[in-house]
Image: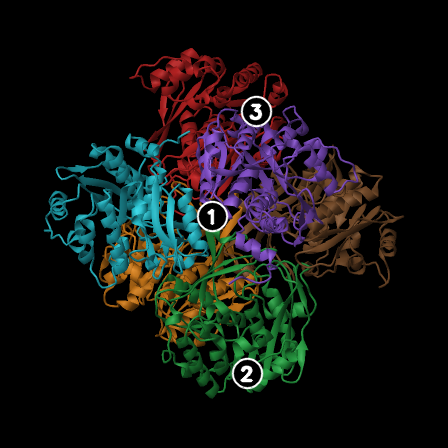
Chain colours: A green, B brown, C purple, D red, E orange, F cyan
Amino acid sequence: MKKVVTFGEILLRLSPPSHLRLTQATSFDLYFGCAEANVAASLSKFGLPVKFITAVPSNELGESSLSMLRSFAVEPIALTQGKRLGIYYFEQGASERPGKVVYDREDSSFSTLRKGMIDWETIFKDAEWFHWSGITPSLSLELAELCEEALLVASRMGLTISADLNYRPTLWRYGKKANEIMPNLVKHCDLLLGGIDESEKVLGVPKNDSDGEDIVFANWMKAFPKLKNIVSTHRMDANASSNGISASLWNGKNLLNSRRYNISHIIDRIGAGDAFMAGIIYGLITWPEDHQTALEFAVAATCLKHSISGDINLATVNEIKALMGGAGGGRVSR
Amino acid sequence: MKKVVTFGEILLRLSPPSHLRLTQATSFDLYFGCAEANVAASLSKFGLPVKFITAVPSNELGESSLSMLRSFAVEPIALTQGKRLGIYYFEQGASERPGKVVYDREDSSFSTLRKGMIDWETIFKDAEWFHWSGITPSLSLELAELCEEALLVASRMGLTISADLNYRPTLWRYGKKANEIMPNLVKHCDLLLGGIDESEKVLGVPKNDSDGEDIVFANWMKAFPKLKNIVSTHRMDANASSNGISASLWNGKNLLNSRRYNISHIIDRIGAGDAFMAGIIYGLITWPEDHQTALEFAVAATCLKHSISGDINLATVNEIKALMGGAGGGRVSR
Amino acid sequence: MKKVVTFGEILLRLSPPSHLRLTQATSFDLYFGCAEANVAASLSKFGLPVKFITAVPSNELGESSLSMLRSFAVEPIALTQGKRLGIYYFEQGASERPGKVVYDREDSSFSTLRKGMIDWETIFKDAEWFHWSGITPSLSLELAELCEEALLVASRMGLTISADLNYRPTLWRYGKKANEIMPNLVKHCDLLLGGIDESEKVLGVPKNDSDGEDIVFANWMKAFPKLKNIVSTHRMDANASSNGISASLWNGKNLLNSRRYNISHIIDRIGAGDAFMAGIIYGLITWPEDHQTALEFAVAATCLKHSISGDINLATVNEIKALMGGAGGGRVSR
Amino acid sequence: MKKVVTFGEILLRLSPPSHLRLTQATSFDLYFGCAEANVAASLSKFGLPVKFITAVPSNELGESSLSMLRSFAVEPIALTQGKRLGIYYFEQGASERPGKVVYDREDSSFSTLRKGMIDWETIFKDAEWFHWSGITPSLSLELAELCEEALLVASRMGLTISADLNYRPTLWRYGKKANEIMPNLVKHCDLLLGGIDESEKVLGVPKNDSDGEDIVFANWMKAFPKLKNIVSTHRMDANASSNGISASLWNGKNLLNSRRYNISHIIDRIGAGDAFMAGIIYGLITWPEDHQTALEFAVAATCLKHSISGDINLATVNEIKALMGGAGGGRVSR
Amino acid sequence: MKKVVTFGEILLRLSPPSHLRLTQATSFDLYFGCAEANVAASLSKFGLPVKFITAVPSNELGESSLSMLRSFAVEPIALTQGKRLGIYYFEQGASERPGKVVYDREDSSFSTLRKGMIDWETIFKDAEWFHWSGITPSLSLELAELCEEALLVASRMGLTISADLNYRPTLWRYGKKANEIMPNLVKHCDLLLGGIDESEKVLGVPKNDSDGEDIVFANWMKAFPKLKNIVSTHRMDANASSNGISASLWNGKNLLNSRRYNISHIIDRIGAGDAFMAGIIYGLITWPEDHQTALEFAVAATCLKHSISGDINLATVNEIKALMGGAGGGRVSR
Amino acid sequence: MKKVVTFGEILLRLSPPSHLRLTQATSFDLYFGCAEANVAASLSKFGLPVKFITAVPSNELGESSLSMLRSFAVEPIALTQGKRLGIYYFEQGASERPGKVVYDREDSSFSTLRKGMIDWETIFKDAEWFHWSGITPSLSLELAELCEEALLVASRMGLTISADLNYRPTLWRYGKKANEIMPNLVKHCDLLLGGIDESEKVLGVPKNDSDGEDIVFANWMKAFPKLKNIVSTHRMDANASSNGISASLWNGKNLLNSRRYNISHIIDRIGAGDAFMAGIIYGLITWPEDHQTALEFAVAATCLKHSISGDINLATVNEIKALMGGAGGGRVSR
């Protein structure tokens, strides 16, 4: 089986237990993760062979982040350089109090990566899919250039390429706007996860207020003709403890809509988008002709992620299929 | 006051804390319990004198299971034999992710019990009530025969007899179907907890799809003429974090229906049926002529159980009566 | 900036973790707080300079209670006398199971305070506001007299005075009824938090069953002409895990009503009233002419308190304003 | 088998985990125990039938203290009266930092006991041994009188009587000195645990500085002719983490000395004396003619207690015998 | 680099935290490990490529045991069969109280392995070393036969073979004595870890009481001429919290003795022998001509293991070399 | 009472609980502290009024670090600037395994401080003592210049000045050697804590191998004539769990030596030097003419610190005096 390659930073997450606020914490629970690493681990949990490309420092934190990936049977390919593992502090929200992320990720080992450091040809040799996200090019121009380097090689070697736009305004701080950088990268993609609100800011594709997903995504496909599928998730009636969730897929012809799930007791919403991303990658690999099933798999995956602590979706293919098949949580499985 | 005797296995339950999945656990919380033990502890908490008949290994786990029962003022009568205490691993569910039980209960001390090992005459001498459940005969033919032995003595000595059908298909694995074994045991019962879906599979009583509880339970009474009351619980709009609950009672004449409770934040649903069972036993002993009150007591008991960690209902008679009387959880009791 | 002075007892709170019942606890989480201390800490968190007047024993528990206050930048002025810090045990409720407080606060250091022990003139010298609550005079006649002593000095020195009626029937046990004591204290107040059900029992102001807040609060203003604002909170559709909350303010002319919040996942409801009290004090200091904004600030403050463990509201002014401005918890703040 | 009756207070102990100081605690571990309760539980763990006489409040803390005793198969006979369970806060020491107890036990339910409240005749009917300690008469004159009442009945009914002097100067605060009260109680005893330093202060028996145990204990026997055995423990080279321990027994003829144990890693030293007391009671019942063996059993019991968290010795008879027989902790028992 | 292959069972270990006894536990800490798995993980931590051959059940516990191995970069090759993962409960000792293991490992997945199920040729293809221990053949005749099967293939394919005798009398219960089985397996070994007390009982080699290691080990080499090195560890002045440790190596010519380490504060002694075993394998691979250095490496490795929680030695090659070079724990490494 | 001012960085410390290694951690315990902050908190605990000058980021971690200081009644004066709070990960050692610090403190808020940012005149107005340490000038040239700025003002305003050399080679990385920077700062000091090994490397004062403290410290006084006292601590027979400790003081005439303490069970050795520093500052303020008593106080303070978790010495003046007076930890204080 050919491999999925994902590329990105892995962060240490520090969270107070039991819904305590950051200023109340006398201990932090540890997790490791970040967008692309979460996708990697989830895909491996689904049974696909996965490599994760990153950089970590030569200390115990770097070592632990790789151990975590290995425990999921992900194969980490990590340059050991730089001085620190990036951190984010995460405070769980509840009801009307939003969750809160405090980033402390600057000057990380990952941020020291540059073009020419990674042997993409070797990495992609036994691979069929390459996944990246908008986090990496948001961090520095050098990382944006490294992304492009990877994308050029992956394109040339014929891999399917996917990206999650993952637009976080607070991260784009090196003097370039997202839409000055991202179009040049997105043009290599076959599959994109994003929302229509990001059309202009991230992709530079203008959008009228009244345009729906069908119109906007059609415009994206025009702007980036390599795109084959565009997916999007929708959160409704949300507070920090509950929301509805659904998703849509535009395949160039139709806008498919998924079932809606109501999530009444959110355990951890971090990584919900990454769970969806892994779900749609798995779905499109498994049911290449059945976009609706792929979409339903992805949205059921993200639904289950909300019930799982940490950044990574631990739901298995069987559990996701059971939820798709109508099984809710009302009965204990014995 | 005459005693209630319950008979069954007691298991060690191992659960990850804080809604973690089993594969995430770095520690397990310990509880001890299982169907009949949970009924015993709850009845003792209600103030009834209770004996619990079982077998445990001669090690710390066996000892701890008996200490737990003693802490509830239950009198355990336990043969010390066999090599291990049965275990079940329990993963709490949340929202659309169902809870999950992984059994590791084979070859337990309890499974080594045989006819002739237990002195039922002495045990029943000061007792008025005997309770068992369908778990025990599901484990082995020998345990089914031991059940029958107990039931014959209890019947002869005039005890009131109750059973919870507790039908779990994955447990019946020794070559007999439930409906080859259970009718011969249920025929001794005065009180039964079960659902109409189990009519054919467990009791061998045929049922048409359109038959309601009144018809099915009337048929059960025909098949098992000693039965005086049949009770059933109903879960509605359920996911792993919330559901509605109500119950019904057929006394041979009327089908009584209870109030419905909406439970919006389930802490632990394990043992909810046992809490109901203890509630209806206590209710029928306390209000033998007032079936509606007995039923309301039982359903309020199971409602409160959902808010309590562990297998055992810790609600007191006063707390249950307060809920029956309309007090919800909206106000802190000072 | 002139200071806010609050006066009252500080208690040790002992709570089982993870929704366990008191009888299940193998450990207790520690918090310190009580009505007026909670108001003090919240006001200091809002940025106001605050003193808290109390008495504690000369031991580690007394010391820790003051350290907690200092950690909030509250200046504690504490007589060190008496033999113990009062305690309350708190069991979190869930769904239909109410939370439960077991008091063990008698014979505390605070209860040994008497008139003449505290130098109110010095304390009030740099202050503009004095806050007390009905808890203190409920504890003993001597403490009621001490309250009056403080109120006379504060009135004479021209401080704005506020009180929370905080009526708890189980506390009034020294032979006086609340309405024999409270009117003589309330008459010094400019701002009062109370509910119309307390009109006769606490303030001795008769009330017809059909009287609404406008009528009752107008009568209170007649009885206590110094009053400028009366506020009240309303809890709706409540169980131990969720409720709605809103509030009203009577300023002698209009009855203003706040927005209603639905709280779907209560983390800790203790101190919700104190969070409101701090909110309205801050609101009236900040927006003295804009009662609606002051009220909305106070009700948003109490809404957020329900999501925070412990007695004290840790919400900041910015967080409260964000909620007032429409931000719910549905999106993680990064 | 006839029963051992012990009588005394049971306290809630609150301790910070992991050697934290009291002022650092964000949680407390819960234990229940106190001198005579610890003896009761240890004797029951040794297999003797035991009753424990006490008083507790009608709340969850009282209930939990009795559940703990029941979990050890001790039969608690508890009057439910008064308003609170006494508390002691315990800070574990380490190396040169001593452990620290902060008492908060005044006004407890136990302190409300009076002569005439307890039916000693019924309690002693099936008993052979009565144990008490000097803690109880130190608390109040009324409790000293209650002790005497119990001792008169026990003496009349022919029970063997033992006492632990347990002299704690900080407790004798009601206006009587220990040696005004204790001699009148000790005169009923057959077995006494005490140290020669307590001769004058507790028993009123004068002692020269140079007198050894043989001389002092012989004088005690003269003063209290009912005494048959006097035992004493000796701690050597002690800091909070390690010490040596040995013991002696005077039987009226010989001063027997035990083996010395070196304890290099103390887990919890609270209850070490109670573990010895239970050991010597068990020893003298089991080997009435072999005082040396009884003494060795008792000192091995107290040695093992130092390795066990909480007030109560959890060592079994077999474990103690193994240590007496030379087995140290150097090898894991499989 | 050629691989090391180890073969054996992996167990779930459940331990109470904080030196609590098993009967006190309200939670268990989870670890996975057992003799050969511990050797595998330690060797991988040293940087060698390692495969571990075993069998696990198809459930979360089996999955977690493999995740743990993968987190160490060990490659698990596990048959998924049978119904349960074996368990051992471990109670930490302290001072004079010995640690205690309660086994619950019967009927495990590993016990269902049989000859012919494992493709040893493929497994050994890229390997240079095979390690097994006396635990496996002690469990059943079938497992002893499977061991022999593996040894025959490994011998034929020219691997270096090592074994730890690991003699535990309580495990040999299937009707064969150790010395009826082990000689036939040991004869394939190049390296053996054992003690002279096991000479007759395990290897069937007679020994006089006065024979030292040089004589006994020379006899072993006569009996098993393939043996090149025999190593042995010695524990001195031991209790559960502290001991001395040293080791010796017989290479057919000389008896080399290691430095002695005094361990004053044992954190966890489980796996100390496995840490030594991994150390000597690494040592002999790294310094094939320098037996003294290999031995010093192994004994320093086991010394450090005593300071590490869990079954597995987490010490790195650099840390072990630092200890060999004289660095003790007296200075914090910054 | 005039104030003590200390100046330095405050770090977040993250430590695995229960002696786990960093790579085993699933949670971290939080502490805040660093050299000068530890001195500040300890002095405040001793009853002196203390200010602490630092810089922190505008986020929850910065806020919590100040709350911690306030909880000790230290007055923090903190510039809010820069982007992160520095971190150090700390792994507790045990026996022969050394403790380990992993620094992640670069680019912290404190590192953004520059000359001219702090109003030293105002800060020193009500102060009598200024304390700094060699950590600050080791971090950057800008911080060394800021140190000098503070020292010049403090000298001019007549404050007593103390420093702890705190030489950590791994920190001096900005291109200057310690002895190029430190002499220019140390020349302002009245009191110095250092060791003779640092003479050349830190102070540039040559030292012969055979020179004892009397010779070396006399040379220091020649080089830095403002010095009045030089103190030094000595650790003996050390591993990570136990060591001896003593100290010496050179006052220009005599070399005073302290008592030696043996610490057999180290809880936390971080901050031991800071505890000594606070002790000697307090000692010299309290007993300015009795250097021996001041020294004994300081060494007893550091002895007790080893028994306390976290960076800060929580020992009180009374506890330290009790230890000086001969009380060890062998007896529980009740």
Task: Write down the residue under mark 1.
Answer: E17
C-alpha separation, residue under disc 1 versus residue under disc 3: 49 Å
Q: Element at badge 2?
A: loop
Q: What residue type is labelled 2?
A: Asp
C-alpha separation, residue under disc 2 versus residue under disc 3: 79 Å
- The answer to whether residue C153 is seen in the rendering is yes
C-alpha separation, residue under disc 1 versus residue under disc 2: 51 Å
Crowd rating for badge 2 (residues with CA inside 10 Å; few <14, some 14–19, many 20+): some
Front position in the image: B328 or E322: B328
Is B313 situated above or below F113? above
Please state if C134 lies on the left or on the right of E209 as rendered.
Answer: right
Find residue C142 and name its label.
3
Report if the CB atoms under discs 2 and 3 are less than 8 Å apart: no
Please state if D290 lies on the left or on the right of B287 as rendered.
Answer: left
Label 2 chain ID: A
Residue drawn at point x = 76 percent, y = 55 percent = B181
- x, y percent for residue F330: 35, 33
Find residue C152 and name its label.
none
Task: Write down the residue under mark 2.
Answer: A190
Residue drawn at point x = 25 percent, y = 48 percent = F153
